[in-house]
């Protein structure tokens, strides 16, 4: 089967590499010439554990190109994995998806299954079907299949090789058979359903996880007021199998390329259909409020950050990725700068991208360097090195050992025992 994947981002590239690992030959096409050049030199443009190794292992089955004609003219299956970012009105911007649709229409020379892996609002697959087939060259038919992606950044390769489920949205038997054959090597429940349902599974799943995070963050905020400890509360809740223990970690809110935009897009979709989806709306509002929680806490120690040495540990929206999209650091750093802080930042992989946005920060190679002589330290990402950092070193190296932990990743009792002034979220 000739497979093409449009878009070599977190979803497209990982999907392509994992298919190649299952024995398929895959052509990856992107409009970004730098990315393609990097990929052709054996390097991944994104940081994901195991990705570069898997690329090298399957290099003879992987082709990277910017040439759309060659990529689309005779493919059996074309996956669309381009971005669907948030528009100003908070709806999903589908222009990248439609641009690929146009390019496929322009170049495809035979019947093709077009699989929409990008997260798209409910009804988009049907609209693309109509759009592409109304413009299709004579004798060419495009069969549009929804196949939402559930990988999480930081564990993208593992999530793709061992998915929780594979959702196929199509009512066309032959297209479903092809998709099931394509996914034969993946040991996961395969769920075939209508395209609208498949599209909704993706939004409903992401928004439910966002809701869980916002819920536990509200409980954490209340814990602080009434003297309970969120760590104990989450643990106590998590043993209930109806609730489950994942996504019950309190912190400074969710970020990343999916939850923020997918909650807003579903809220928007409900709104234009004259329905108010109150739970999702609340999740969004709570998350907005949570982002500056540590900054508010800093007021307990300093009236402002003016002239202070401020250490920032972690810049990416979560560990295991170099992605900064909607990272809490991006909300906090401008506020700190406005306040007059001297910022020394450390992140094991996010530095290069952050430096492009904020070249004026002092970037450090080690945690030691970042916290040395600091008046206050903010933790935004629970990188392993931060979780394992000995609390006594904050006391030893900082001018005043005030540590505000936005991910509850340090051991609170160890921090207190070592004489740190430590605050997490809800503990
Ligand atoms: N990132 C995630 O964790 C994740 C998880 C599940 C689903 N999704 C969804 O998958 C989609 C892609 O997300 P992502 O994070 O991989 O995006 P990304 O921004 O990392 O990658 C998108 C890629 O598409 C390329 N592109 C744009 N226009 C193109 C065109 N006409 N032809 C070929 N390539 C083109 C871009 O250059 C870029 O490399 C989004 O809809 C997202 O919501 C993302």
Image (cartoon, rainbow, N blue to C red):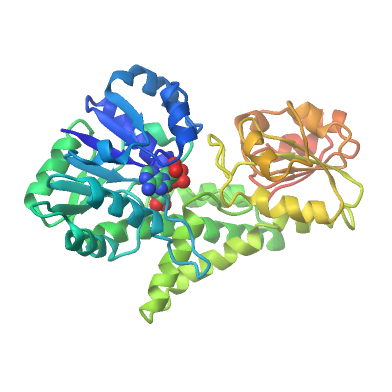
Residue 36: horizontal and vertical position, in percent?
43, 32
Residue 55: horizontal and vertical position, in percent?
38, 23
Q: Decide which of 305, 10 is in the foreground and name it.
A: 10
Q: Decide which of 409, 309 is in the foreground and name it.
A: 309
The answer to whether residue 210 is left or right of residue 75 is right
- The number of callouts visible is 0
Q: Quadrant of residue 268?
A: bottom left
- Mark yes or no: residue 161 visible: no
> Which residue sits at x=31%, y=48%?
117
Q: Decide which of 413, 276 is in the foreground and name it.
A: 276
Residue 321: horizontal and vertical position, in percent?
53, 36
Residue lying at the far bottom of the rendered structure = 274
The answer to whether residue 98 is left or right of residue 233 is left
- Mark yes or no: residue 276 visible: yes
Residue 149: horizontal and vertical position, in percent?
34, 46
Examine the rendered structure and indicate whether residue 391 appears above or below residue 263. Answer: above
> Which residue sits at x=16%, y=40%?
76
Instruction: Say which quadrant the N terminus sits in.
Output: top left
């Amino acid at each position: 089967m000739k497979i093409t994947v449009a878009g070599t981002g977190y979803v497209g590239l990982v999907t392509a590499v994992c298919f190649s690992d299952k024995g398929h030959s895959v052509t990856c096409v992107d409009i970004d010439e730098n990315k393609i050049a990097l990929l052709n030199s054996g390097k991944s443009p994104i940081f994901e554990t195991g990705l570069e190794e898997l690329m090298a292992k399957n290099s003879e089955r992987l082709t990277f190109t910017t040439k759309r004609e060659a990529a689309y003219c005779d493919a059996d299956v074309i996956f669309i994995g381009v971005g669907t970012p948030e528009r100003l009105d908070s709806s999903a911007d589908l222009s990248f998806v439609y641009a690929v649709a146009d390019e496929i229409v322009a170049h495809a020379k035979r019947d093709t299954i077009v699989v929409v892996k990008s997260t798209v609002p409910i009804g988009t697959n049907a609209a693309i079907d109509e759009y592409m087939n109304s413009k299709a060259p004579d004798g060419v038919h495009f069969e549009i299949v929804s196949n939402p992606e559930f990988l999480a950044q930081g564990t993208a390769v593992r999530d793709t090789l061992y998915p929780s489920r594979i959702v196929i949205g199509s009512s066309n038997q032959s297209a479903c058979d092809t998709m099931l054959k394509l996914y034969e090597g993946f040991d996961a429940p395969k769920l075939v359903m209508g395209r609208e349902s498949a599209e909704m599974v993706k939004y409903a799943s992401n928004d439910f996880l966002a809701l869980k995070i916002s819920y536990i963050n509200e409980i954490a905020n209340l814990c602080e007021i009434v003297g309970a400890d969120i760590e104990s509360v989450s643990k106590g809740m998590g043993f209930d199998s109806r609730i489950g223990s994942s996504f019950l970690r309190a912190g400074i809110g969710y970020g990343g390329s999916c939850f923020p935009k997918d909650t807003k897009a579903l809220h928007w979709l409900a709104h234009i259909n004259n329905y108010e989806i109150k739970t999702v709306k609340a999740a969004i509002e709570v998350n907005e409020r949570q982002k500056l929680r540590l900054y508010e806490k800093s007021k307990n120690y300093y009236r402002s950050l003016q002239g202070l040495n401020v250490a920032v540990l972690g810049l990416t929206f979560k560990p295991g990725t170099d992605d900064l999209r909607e990272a809490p650091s991006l909300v906090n750093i401008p506020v700190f700068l406005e306040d007059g802080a001297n910022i020394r930042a450390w992140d094991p992989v996010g530095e290069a991208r952050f430096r492009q946005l904020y070249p004026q920060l002092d970037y450090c190679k080690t945690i030691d360097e970042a916290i040395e002589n600091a008046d206050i330290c903010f933790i935004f990402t629970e990188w392993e090195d931060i979780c394992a950092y000995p609390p006594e070193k904050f006391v030893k190296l900082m001018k005043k050992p005030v540590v505000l932990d936005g991910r509850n990743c340090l051991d609170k009792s160890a921090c207190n025992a070592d004489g740190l002034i430590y605050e997490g979220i809800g503990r």
